[in-house]
Image (spheres, helix red, strand yellow):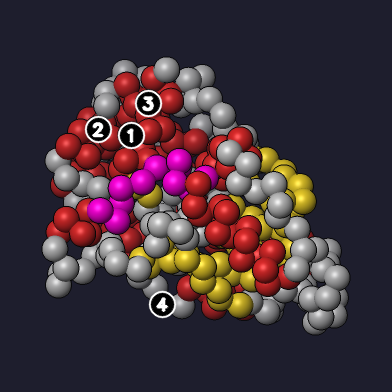
Amino acid sequence: MAKYPSKPLLLALLCAFAAARINSLDQNGICKSLVETEGYTCQDHQVTTEDGYILGLQRIPYGKSNNNSTAQKLPVLLQHGLTMDGGAWLLNPPDQALAFILADKGFDVWLANARGTKASRGHNSLSTYDPVKPLLLQMAYWEWTWDQLAAYDLPAFFNYVNNQTGQKVHYVGHSLGTLSVLAALSQQKLSNTLRSAALLSPVAYLNQITTLLIQSFARTYAANGLYATGLRDFPPVGQALGTMLQFLCSMPGVDCSDILVAITGPNCCLTPTSSNLVFQQHILQPTSTKNMVHLSQMIRR
């Protein structure tokens, strides 16, 4: 029997998604809220892609235990996964968070934020939410998939870090961050700036995904339905989110009692309470509905 959210749980989930959207407007940003609070130096940078998106980068130039010079330090670029941002590399304590570990080991650490996340909402002519501008311009901002992440975002990040440091770049990608770099490499986009690549939870094909909630999302064409109604950023909020969750969580075998496990599968180290807190406060960053349509196509293959 399917386990779907009761009305109180559904309300809590709606509040979690809404809180994540509110957090996405937080002006403190990753440097002030997640890096400097741990005693590390952090810098905010911006880079503009060839198609006009203005992306945020955070730099941790050195760790606590090494000197303040960036000379001879090798740069490493960390690229997050789907519905995350650069903060995903900073959630654990410093001795367990990759960004801090690399900084303390003497690397010049750069945190990338994909277009659509809270640090990468800018554009030369388009806007995500602007009541002054026409709705079509706001919708146009979200007309992209991971194809554009590979073609524009990653080359922009690599070129910027290379220009700032004068060195080729080590790369660590997680999940969607591996798919985009594999696609970029297949297009010869990074051949002059990449030093090495480490792929965590690498993605090339998705038709063997095991979580029933994600299978149901793809096989019911949920993303296509959202796109058809004009909802261009994902996940939706309000009634659209409630309707989607109620429908998907009522599918046979789907258990939404722990929403993070329902999406990612069982994890080793997080309790339902702590995982939902992490999910609410840090993980849920917007992506485009069109990107979800593309990924769903890959699951259905």
Give the percent coordinates (x, y) of residue 149: 48, 48
**Quadrant of the image occupied by residue 247:** top left
Residue labelled with disc 1: 293
Residue at 41% over, 77% down:
27
- Answer left or right for 242 relative to 155: left
Q: Which residues are magenta?
A: 140-150
Label number found at residue 27: 4
CB within 8 Å, label 2 to label 3: no
Q: Residues within 10 Å of mark 4 (few under 14, many from 20)?
A: few
Which residue is at 41% across, 62% downward?
A: 53
Marks 3,4: beta carbons within 8 A = no
10 Å crowding of disc 1: few (<14), some (14-19), many (20+): some
Quadrant for the C terminus, please. Answer: top left
Q: Amino acid at mark 2?
A: Asn
Label 2, label 3: how far apart the Cα atoms are = 10 Å
Q: Residue 297 got which mark?
A: 3
